Every structure is written in structure tokens, then in C-alpha cells.
Amino acid sequence: MSNVFSVLSTLVTQYVDSIRNGSLPCVESALISLAETENQRALSHGLDCYSQQMALLVLPTSDDKALLNHHYQALQKALDVFLSNAFMDENNNYQRQLNVSLILKIQSYGSLFGSGARSI
């Protein structure tokens, strides 16, 4: 519920700011701007969640399989966090950014252990 309140509050603020600046307010422009702000925030929260989950991994792992299993669990949690915070992510642009960022992160972890994790 607080996420809905935050979204509506931001939308109203942008709309009122537009009026104060002498511009003709446009709900569509405000929604697009709001979506960008909220999706950047969702992306950041998803990446933070992944990093927090991966920080729980006890290093060194016995093999790449342990690393990959932990990665997949962290990935799912990060995706859940992102999806619960994303707003109007049309064409899944921000979700794709999240996926690319997470692939780069697991590859950096994989470079610590050998070639297996780099092939994700």
C-alpha cells in the first residue's frame, strides 16, 4: 500500500510542479516520468537485493554448482523485488537491464572460481 501512496504522491507532485512552472500539465508525460523514476528505483532495489543475497554466500565454495545454486536463489529474490516495485515497465526495458546487470555480477563471481560460472 505504501508503494501505491508513493506513486500517487510523486504523480501529484509532478503535476502540481508543472502547473507552478506555467506549463500545461499532461498526465501522460507525468506518468512516463513517474514510470522512469519508479523503474530506476525498482532496478536499484533488485540489484541491492541480489548483492545482499550473494553476500551471504560462504566463500570459497566447493564448486561452481554451489555458486550457481546460490546465484539462482538470489536471482529469483532480486527479480521478485524488482517486479513488486516496477511500474509500467513497457517492453520490459528495465527488467532487461536488471538481467544484464545480474549476468555481469555472476560472471564476476564466477571469475573467482573458474570457467564454469562464466558460461551462464
Image (tube, rainbow, N blue to C red):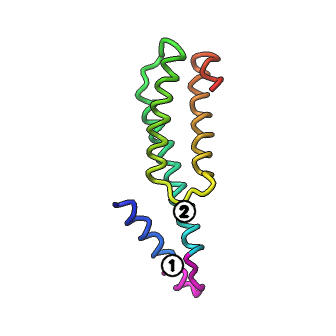
Q: Which residue, as the protein is rendered here, is positioned at the far left?
A: 1
Q: Residue at x 42, y 70 (%)?
A: 8
Q: Residue at x 52, y 23 (%)?
A: 68
Horizontal and vertical percent position of residue 36: 57, 61
Quick check: 40 above or below 22?
Answer: above
The answer to if 20 sits in the magenta stretch is: yes
Q: Which residues are magenta?
A: 16-27
Q: Please state, as top left, top right, bottom left or bottom right, where the N terminus lies in the image.
A: bottom left
User: Does 110 lie within the magenta span?
Assistant: no
SS of the residue at dot 2? Answer: helix
Q: Quadrant of residue 112?
A: top right
Snapshot quadrant of residue 106: top right
Q: Residues within 10 Å of mark 2 (few under 14, many from 20)?
A: some
Q: Label 1: which residue? A: 15
Residue 75's place in the image compared with 120, above or below, is below
Tag 2: residue type? Ala
Q: Position of residue 46 (x, y in %)?
A: 49, 44
Give the structural element (helix, strand or loop) at label 1: helix
Picture residue at 58% right of the left edge, 87% below the top: 22
Residue 21: horizontal and vertical position, in percent? 56, 84
The disc labelled 1 sits on which kind of residue? Tyr
